[in-house]
Image (cartoon, coloured by chain):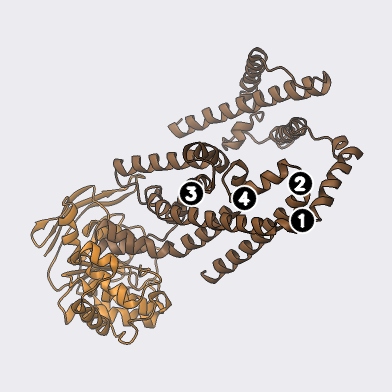
Amino acid sequence: MLKIGSLEKKYPNGCHALKGVSFDVEKGEFLVIIGLSGSGKSTLLRCINRIHDPTSGVVEFNGKNITSIKGKELREARSKIGMIFQHFNLIPRRSVLVNVLTGKMAKLGLIKSILGLYSEEDKKEALEKIKIVGLEGKENVRADNLSGGQQQRVSIARALMQNPEVLLADEPVASLDPATSHSVMQYLEKINKEYGVTVICNLHFLSLVRQYATRVIALKNGEIVFQGGPKEINDTWFKEIYGEEAVEVTIN
Amino acid sequence: MNKTKKIDLVKAYLSDAFFWSYSLIVCHKVIYDKLILGTRYPVFSWTTTIITTFIGILIATILFNIKNFSVGKKIKNISEIENNNFPFYKFFSYFLFIITFVAGLKISQVSMDDLFSSSGASGAGKLFGAMLNPNFSIFEPALFATIETIFMAFIATVFAIPIAFLLSFFAARNLMSHNIFAKSAYVTTRFVLNITRSIEPLVWATILSVWVGIGPFAGMLALCLHSVASLAKLYSEQIEGINDGPIEAMTATGAHQIQIIWFGVVPQIVLPFLSFTIYRWDINVRMATVIGLVGGGGIGTLLMQYQGLAKWNEVGLIVLIIAIVVMIMDFASAKIREAIK
C-alpha cells in the first residue's frame, strides 16, 4: 500500500539525510526502522507524510503518487496517515478530549473547528478512541498534566481519530521508562492487529524490535543496510548496523 | 582559503578600520579640541573628519598585516601565532573604553560646579518645598483627569491587542519562512513595526493632535500606535520561541494552515500574550501622563498647565496622585501576571 522509490533528502544546510531509499510496505505490517541517531529514520517518516519534502524520489500511497501534491489533496492524504512522536506533541493547556478531537481537523470545517463546535458524533467517536487506549475517565483532564505514557496514549488516540490506514511512530517510547514503553508498544500492537492499521515505527531497543516487529529495515547514513525479519538480526548484522563498538542494551 | 574565511577577514579588517578611525576622531574632537584647546563648541568640519578617518584606515591597514596587532582578527577568531607577552588587543580595548568614557563626560557636559552651586540648590529646594505641600483644593479635577488618563491607556491597549495579535504572526520568522511571499510579508511587517516603534509616542501625539485635534483622542491614538508596534514585536518573539512539536503534529493530521496555527501555536502563547498585554497597559498609564504634556489630555495636560503657571503646590498634588496611581498599577499588574503564570 506504500511504495517508497529511491527517496533522497538533502537539507538546506547540506546534510544528506537520505540517499536513495526504496522499499514497499504491505497492508497490516508492523514495520520497524532501526539505525543510529542521525541515520535518517525520522527524516524518512517525515518524508512519507510530507512534513518534509523529499529532494527527489517517489512516495506512492495506495497507488497514488503523493510526492508533489499540494493544498487540499495533500491534507487529504495526510489525514489517512496518523503520526505519533517521541515528545508526544500534544497541545498544551487543552483537555484530552480536545486533543483527540484535533485528529478530525481535516474533516471539520475551518470555522467550526476554530470555534470548537464539535458534533456529538465526533465527541462520541473521540470518547471511543480514548477508551481504546485505556484512558476513559481522563477526557476532561488537561493533557499536559498526564504522565509521559498517558500522553503518548492520548497521541495514539489522536492518530486513531483520523481513522488512519498507516500509523507513523517516530521513536514513540524513547522518552518513556521500560514498563511504560511496553504498555505503549502493546497499544500499538493492538491497533495493528485488531484494527488493521499498518504501523511504521522507529525504534532504538532491539528487544522491543524482536518482540513487536513483523519486518525490520535498518538505515545507516541514509541508506538501507538490512531488510528482513526481526529474528534475523544476529551479532554480525548488529555490528554492521550500529558499528563495531556498539553493545546491545536490553529493555525488559 | 574558503569563502567564509575570506568574508571573516574582510569583516576583521573593516572593524579594525572602524576602531582606529573612531579613536582618532574622538581623540581629535574631544581630547584635543575640548580639553587642550578649550573650545566649548568645536566647529564640525568634513575636511578634518575625513582626514582623521583616512589616517585611521591607514594605521589599521599597516597594523592589520603585523601579527597580533589586529583587534578585528581577534574578534573574528582568526588564528595567529599566540604572543602572550604583549596582548595588544587588550590594551587597545581599554584605550577605546577610556576615550569613550572621557568623550561621554565632555559631551553630556557633566559639571560638579553646576550640581553643587548654592543658588541653583536653593531654587530647587523652594520648588521641592512647595511640592511637598500639595494643594488639595484641586483634588477633584486632578482625580477626574487621572481617571481620564487610565481609561485612555486602557482603550489604547484594548484597540492595540487584536491588531498586534494579527501582525505578530506575520512578524514571526518561524511561521513565515516557507516561501518567498511569506518571507517578504515578514520583512515588510518587521520594517513597518520597527519604524512605528522608533517614533516616540510623544511625537505621534504631536502629529495626531494636529490631525484629530488636541485632547484625549489624539493621546489615545498615539499610545495605541506605539502599543501595536511594541506588542507585535513581543508577541512575535514569543511565537518564535514556541515548541514546534504541536505544529508538526497538527500538520500530520492533515489540518489547514489556519487550524495548525490555532491549535499548534495559539495555546502555547496565550498566557505570555496576556502577561505582556497587562504589562503594556501599565506602561501605557505611565506614558499617558507624559503624552498629556503635548496636549494628549488627561492628567498630563493638567500638570503642564500648572507647571506653566509655576503653581508648584498644585504640581505637587498632581505628582502625588500620579505616583500613587503608578504604584497601584504596578502592584496590580505584577499580581495579575503572577497569578496567570
Residue under the image location 78 percent in, 51 percent down:
B313
Point out residue A141 in the picture as x, y percentages from the top left corner: 38, 80
- The residue that disc 2 covers is B311
- The residue that disc 3 covers is B224
Question: Which is more N-terminal, label 2 or label 3?
Answer: 3
Q: Which color was chain A given? A: orange
Kindly report the distance in space between the C-alpha atoms of the residues bearing marks 3 and 4. Answer: 14 Å
Point out residue A29 in the picture as x, y percentages from the top left corner: 16, 72
Q: Which SS class for mark 3? A: helix
Question: Which quarter of the image is occupied by the C terminus of chain A?
Answer: bottom left
Kindly report the distance in space between the C-alpha atoms of the residues bearing marks 1 and 4. Answer: 19 Å
Q: Which SS class for mark 1? A: loop
- The residue that disc 4 covers is B289
Q: Is residue B111 left or right of residue A115?
A: right
Q: Which SS class for mark 4? A: helix
Residue at mark 3: chain? B
The amino acid type, in three-letter code, at marker 2 is: Lys
The amino acid type, in three-letter code, at marker 4 is: Thr
Front tag of 3 and 4: 4
Is B187 drawn above or below residue B341 in the view shown? above
Q: In front: A202, or B243?
A: B243
Is B46 drawn above or below residue B13 in the view shown? above
The answer to whether tags 1 and 4 share a subunit is yes
View extreme (bottom): residue: A137
Residue at mark 2: chain? B
Is B113 drawn above or below residue A24 in the view shown? above
